[in-house]
Amino acid sequence: MKKPIIILAVTALFASAFALGNFVPVFAAKYKVGKDSKLAKAACGVCHASAKGGKLNPYGDDLKAALKAAGSKKLTPEILAKVEGLDSNKNGVKNIDEIKKDMLPGAK
């Protein structure tokens, strides 16, 4: 009985990770992120506390809220635009301005 539950849980975990795998390419395309930039090197760390994923940083939290408000699980350029004017990390600089300066908008 435990084996099917474990298989189901692992499948769900990988399915959700795969579904979110479009975030980095969508972000990179919208903001024309260069391959040697800090943003490109951060990869998942643009939205997560770690480049390996895991817990969301403040920018990731704002994107999650924008996705929920849009009723979507798929990141689009339009959803990214909804958080551009925010200052997710509360450092006095809008997300879009940090992105243009090749800075992480969720970094503290």
Image (spheres, helix red, strand yellow):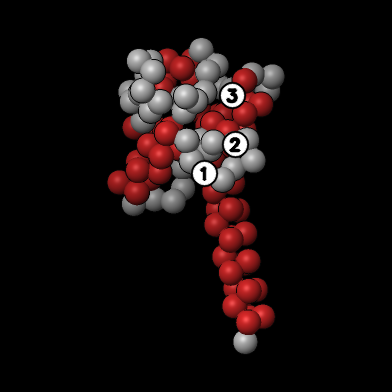
Whether residue 70 is visible, yes or no, is no
Q: Position of residue 108 (x, y in %)?
A: 47, 24
* Dots 2, 1 in contact, CB < 8 A: yes
Secondary element at tag 2:
loop
Q: Quarter-wise, where is residue 94 in the image?
A: top left
* 26 lies left or right of 66: right
> Which residue is rendered at x = 51% and y = 44% of the image?
55
In primary-sequence order, the first of circles 3 and 2 is 3
| Amino acid of disc 2 | Ser
| Amino acid of disc 1 | Lys
The residue to which callout 3 is attached is 39
Q: Give the spatial CA distance, label 3 vs label 1.
A: 18 Å
Q: Is residue 85 above or below residue 15?
A: above
> Which residue is rendered at x = 60% and y = 53% of the image?
18
* 6 lies left or right of 105: right
The residue to which callout 1 is attached is 55
* 30 lies left or right of 37: left
* 95 lies left or right of 51: left
Q: Position of residue 40 (x, y in %)?
A: 63, 26
Q: Quarter-wise, where is residue 42 in the image?
A: top right
Q: Give the spatial CA distance, label 3 vs label 2.
A: 13 Å
Q: Position of residue 72 (x, y in %)?
A: 39, 50
Secondary element at tag 1:
loop
The residue to which callout 2 is attached is 50
| Residue count near mark 1 (Cα–Cα under 10 Å), binned few <14, some 14–19, many ≥20 | few
> Which residue is rendered at x = 44% and y = 51% of the image?
73
In primary-sequence order, the first of circles 2 and 1 is 2
| Amino acid of disc 3 | Leu
Q: Quarter-wise, where is residue 53 in the image?
A: top right
Q: Position of residue 85 (x, y in %)?
A: 33, 23
Q: Give the spatial CA distance, label 2 vs label 1.
A: 8 Å
